[in-house]
Image (tube, helix red, strand yellow):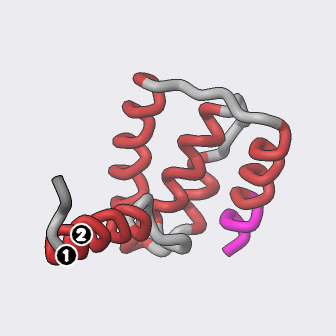
Amino acid sequence: MTASKPGLAALAALSLAGCTMAGPMPGTPEFTAVQVSRAYDCGLSVDRSRIIARLPAEQRGRFVAANASYAVKSYNAPRRCDATERERLQQELRLGARR
């Protein structure tokens, strides 16, 4: 059984779409929420109030909603992280808090 060329093209397009839509875009409040959630997974202390205070007022609601959504997912599927990931998260959250 062989696949048709249009079928293969559609399959390739779908697989590429999945690669580009893996998560929120960096610089968005949703991306920051992912980082905060992952930091909690790694056992890092995170000052959410400082992060929220540094966000523009119009983005704060998006961050809070995304953070609540990711926190629920995190509780359902906790993962461990290594020292390299923990250090990267700490650095990214420090840089994000300064913006």
Quadrant in which the C terminus is drawn: bottom right
Q: Tell me: residue 1, above or below residue 8.
A: above
Mark 1 = which residue?
Answer: 5
Q: Is residue 62 rendered to the left or right of residue 4?
A: right
Q: Residue furthest front?
A: 1
Which secondary structure type mostly characterizes the magenta part of the structure?
Answer: helix
Where residue 14 sits, quadrant-wise, is bottom left
Alpha carbon distance from label 1 to label 2: 5 Å
| Circle 2: element type | helix
Residue 76 horizontal/vertical position (percent): 41, 23
Q: Residue at x 72, y 51 (%)?
A: 89
Q: Disc number at residue 8?
A: 2
Q: Disc number at residue 83?
A: none
Q: What's under tag 2, amino acid-wise?
A: Leu
Q: Is residue 87 magenta?
A: no
Q: Residue at x 33, y 50 (%)?
A: 65
Q: Is residue 97 magenta?
A: yes
Q: Residue at x 65, y 45 (%)?
A: 47
Q: What's under tag 1, amino acid-wise?
A: Lys
Q: CB under 8 Å between callouts 1 and 2? A: yes
Estimate how packed mark 2 is, as few (under 14), some (14 to 19) or many (20 or more) residues with alpha carbons within 10 Å: few
Estimate how packed mark 1 is, as few (under 14), some (14 to 19) or many (20 or more) residues with alpha carbons within 10 Å: few
Instruction: Specify start and end residues of the magenta stretch as a single range.
Output: 94-99
Residue 50 horizontal/vertical position (percent): 63, 55
Q: Nearer the viewer, residue 12 or 40?
A: 12
Residue 7 horizontal/vertical position (percent): 16, 68
Q: Is residue 30 rendered to the left or right of residue 84?
A: left
Q: Tell me: residue 92, above or below residue 81.
A: below
Does residue 96 appear in this view? yes
| Circle 1: element type | helix
